[in-house]
Amino acid sequence: MSEFTLAALERIIAERAQSGDAQSWTAKLVAGGQEKAAKKLGEEAVETVIAALKGDRDAVVSESADLLYHWLVVLKLAGVPLSAVLSELESRTAQSGIAEKAARGG
C-alpha cells in the first residue's frame, strides 16, 4: 500500500500553484480563482455521486480522486489548511453524529 497522503497532495498542490507553469493544471486552476475551482469541485462531486449510483466501482475510485484533489485546491484558495478540517473532524468524534448535528441546530 502506498504511503501517499492527503497532506502530501496538499503540499504538491501548494508547490504547483506557485509554479506559474503553463502546463500545470493546478497552476491554471488556481489562477482561475475560487469560482473556477469551486465549480470544478461541484462537477466532481456530481460525477462521484453518479458513479456511486451506477455502482461503477472504478469510476467511484477515479471520481473520488478528482473530488479530493479539487477539494484541496478549494481549501488552498480559501486559505484553509487540511489540518483545520481534520481537527474539526476529530472534534466531532467525541459525540454521535446525530448529537453533533443537533448541537449545530441542523
Image: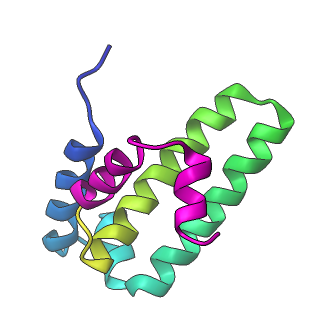
Q: Quadrant of the N terminus?
A: top left
36 in relation to 62, above or below: below
Q: Residue at x 27, y 36 (%)?
A: 5
Asked whether, in this view, residue 29 is left or right of residue 51, the answer is left
Q: Residue furthest top?
A: 1
Asked if the magenta segment contains residue 53, the reply would be no
Q: Quadrant of residue 84?
A: bottom left
Asked if the magenta segment contains residue 94, the reply would be yes
Q: Quadrant of the C terminus?
A: bottom right
15 in relation to 55, above or below: below
- State the extent of the magenta-drawn residues as a range: 82-106
Q: x, y percentage for residue 49?
A: 74, 49
84 in relation to 8, above or below: below
Q: x, y percentage for residue 66?
A: 51, 50
Q: x, y percentage for residue 100?
A: 52, 55
Asked whether, in this view, residue 6 is left or right of residue 32, the answer is left
Q: Residue at x 46, y 75 (%)?
A: 37
SS assignment for the magenta stretch, majority: helix
Q: Residue at x 49, y 86 (%)?
A: 35
Q: Residue at x 76, y 30 (%)?
A: 56
